[in-house]
Image (tube, rainbow, N blue to C red):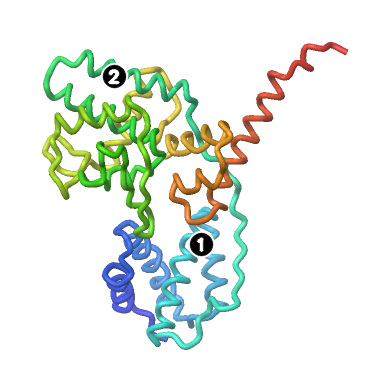
């Protein structure tokens, strides 16, 4: 078949306006599929299983297994759409089993002590602020960190919050997750609620507009949140690179260590599959081993 960039644009249009996929997903599809079309055109091949297998071998030379897995998922979705729209008569992904040896990597977490110190540093920065700008930024920093840890939301979800998503009367936050899925989480901690109240009083975000704002009243960027966390990590002397997703990992892991049912954690995180959430059980298993290795009283018996 004639696989062209023009056909790709039709697919991306359908992803955006018919499937209502978010901008990040569409951007990833564009990158992954443009790469495949270039390979396809260069090798003047056919779109069949043999081509897919050769392309996987090609990707394995330059990409990590996780990246290869994502690119194959993008290509599979594209082929499914082409088949549905009668551009493709024989879908090469039908009955094609792809095995990728993706290394198992435990999610990186932050200790509760470090989170406490980072929050304390932000509150202290507010107390020590000399200018109105410093005071406003510190209030936003506090609200950002408090709600990140209180909800375990993704940084993209945090930056995507609009003012109407925060209901201080009911103590809830509506989170717009992946795949246009929404979930509502309770905010039960008084300090978190107070940080949001003070932020709203200072920034006065408008209805149906971004909740977290820059000084110019535009939507706060994800990179700004990352820089915020790193700033306070450096202030308390933590050499580890701290990311927003580590707050999310810590949220889940600490709840699991407090014997919260993993299915509740799945709902809180907005995971569509319990399999995704189960990675945190491996973290607590590692924690358990560390405790037994270093804290068990048998270590004090010298027989």
Name which quarter of the figure residue 149 lies in: top left
Mark 2 or 1, nearer chain start: 1
Mark 1 = which residue?
59
Which label belongs to residue 174? none
Instruction: Select label 2 or label 1 by which is in front.
Output: 2
Say few, some or many: other residues with alpha carbon within 10 Å of mark 2 (under 14 / 14 to 19 / 20 or more): some
Which quarter of the figure is the N terminus placed in? bottom left
Q: Secondary structure at mark 2?
A: helix
How much space separates mark 2 and mark 1, taking CA atoms? 47 Å
Q: Is residue 178 left or right of residue 112?
A: left
Name which quarter of the figure residue 235 lies in: top left
| Label 2 close to label 1 by CB (< 8 Å) | no
In the displayed orientation, state which residue is furthest to the right: 303
| Residue at (50, 38) in percent of width and height | 252
Relative to 55, residue 202 above or below: above
Q: How many marks?
A: 2
In the displayed orientation, state which residue is furthest to the front: 170
Q: Is residue 123 left or right of residue 45?
A: left
Q: x, y percentage for residue 4?
A: 34, 79
| Residue at (44, 71) in percent of width and height | 77
Mark 2 = which residue?
123
Q: Nearer the viewer, residue 48 or 285?
A: 285
Q: x, y percentage for residue 246?
A: 44, 36
Q: x, y percentage for residue 122?
A: 30, 21
Q: Is residue 11 left or right of residue 261?
A: left
Q: Nearer the viewer, residue 27 or 188?
A: 188
Say few, some or many: other residues with alpha carbon within 10 Å of mark 1 (under 14 / 14 to 19 / 20 or more): some
Name which quarter of the figure residue 197 lies in: top left
| Residue at (36, 62) in percent of width and height | 31
| Residue at (31, 59) in percent of width and height | 22
Q: Secondary structure at mark 1?
A: helix
Q: Nearer the viewer, residue 153 or 172?
A: 172
């Amino acid at each position: 078949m004639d696989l062209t960039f023009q056909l790709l644009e039709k697919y991306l249009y359908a992803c955006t306006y018919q499937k209502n996929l978010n901008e990040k997903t569409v951007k990833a599809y564009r990158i992954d599929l443009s790469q495949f079309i270039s390979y396809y055109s260069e090798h003047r091949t056919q779109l069949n299983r043999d081509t897919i297998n050769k392309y996987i071998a090609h990707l394995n030379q330059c990409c990590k297994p996780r990246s290869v897995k994502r690119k194959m998922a993008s290509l599979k979705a594209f082929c499914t759409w082409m088949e549905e729209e009668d551009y493709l008569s024989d879908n090469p992904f039908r009955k094609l089993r792809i095995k990728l040896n993706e290394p198992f990597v435990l999610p990186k977490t932050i200790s509760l002590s470090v989170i406490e110190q980072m929050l304390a540093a932000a509150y202290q920065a507010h107390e020590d602020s000399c200018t109105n700008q410093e005071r406003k930024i510190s209030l936003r920093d506090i609200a950002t960190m408090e709600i990140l840890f209180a909800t375990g939301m993704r940084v993209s979800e945090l930056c995507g919050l609009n003012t109407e998503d925060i209901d201080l009367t009911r103590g809830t936050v509506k989170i717009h997750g992946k795949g246009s899925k929404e979930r509502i989480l309770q905010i039960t901690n008084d300090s978190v609620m107070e940080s949001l109240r003070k932020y709203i009083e200072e920034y006065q975000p408008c209805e149906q507009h971004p909740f977290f704002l820059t000084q110019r009243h535009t939507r706060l960027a994800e990179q700004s949140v990352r820089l915020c966390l790193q700033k306070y990590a450096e202030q308390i002397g933590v050499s580890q690179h701290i990311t927003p997703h580590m707050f999310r990992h810590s949220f889940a892991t600490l709840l699991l260590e407090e014997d919260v049912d993993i299915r509740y954690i799945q709902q809180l995180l907005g995971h569509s599959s319990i399999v995704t959430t189960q990675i945190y059980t491996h973290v607590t298993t590692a924690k358990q081993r560390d405790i037994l290795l270093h804290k068990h009283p048998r270590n004090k018996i010298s027989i």
